[in-house]
Image: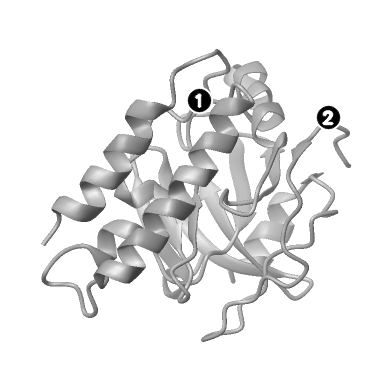
Amino acid sequence: MSHSHNQIVEQLPLKSICSMCYNNRPKLDWTIREFTYAELHAATQGFSIKNFLSEGGFGSVYKGEIHGQKIAVKQCIHANHKQEKEFKSEVDALTKARHENVVMFLGSCSEGNNRFLVYEFVCNGSLDQHLSQYSRKPLCWQDRVKVANGAAKGLLYLHQNNIIHRDIKPNNILLTHDCKALVILTYIFNINHNHQMQIFVIVFMLFSAR
């Protein structure tokens, strides 16, 4: 079952592949779709612990693959059929954003009490994993500038289209091995808002970390 939406699209590069691991981004014309639970269960190998990526207040995130496309499956433990209207509103908002510095939303699953959001897989983890002095390979200053620039572009695009993030922090900025920054949308707030403060927060996080 496919969704038809008015997407706010900014053209992605013709070739968007990580030069280190060759992870390929989904094509711009990817059709947002409704996944079945069986599809996501198979894609993640039964939500196997080896495919576990992270966990937050919303639930767990698992890596998977469907038709050769790597995906990240986000469990929504607080959503169920009783909150279906709110969940669908969130899905509708997520489908509208298409930008090279925003993690691409691929679809959702609403089956029984199961609620999942499906995103493209971003290969090099989140920004918080690369800022600490205890990181395996902390970001150099040149890479920090690149990340700050990319994340700011993603946020600016969202805010110019009245999509307000509300939860910008290092673990909601994902990176490729080429230090391309992609903002992942976790909460949606559709009103006009000044974007300058959140962009300042990104710059402060990157250049105050040691």
State whether residue 185 appears in this view: no
Q: Which residue is mark 1?
A: 164
State the residue at coordinates (60%, 43%).
116
Q: Residues within 10 Å of mark 2 (few under 14, many from 20)?
A: few
Q: Which residue is mark 2?
A: 6
State the residue at coordinates (60%, 40%).
114
Local secondary structure at mark 2? loop
The label number, if any, that marks residue 204 in the structure image: none
| Residue that sits furthest to the bottom in the current view | 20
Local secondary structure at mark 1? loop
Mark 1 and mark 2: span between their CA atoms?
18 Å
Disc nearer the start of the sequence (1/2): 2
Q: Image quadrant of residue 109?
A: top right
- What's the amino acid at mark 1? Ile
What is the total number of numbered labels drawn onto the structure image? 2
- Residue 48 horizontal/vertical position (percent): 49, 69
Q: Residues within 10 Å of mark 1 (few under 14, many from 20)?
A: many
- Residue 10 horizontal/vertical position (percent): 73, 45
- Residue 175 horizontal/vertical position (percent): 44, 64
Q: Quadrant of the N terminus?
A: top right
- What's the amino acid at mark 2? Asn
Q: Image quadrant of residue 98?
A: top right
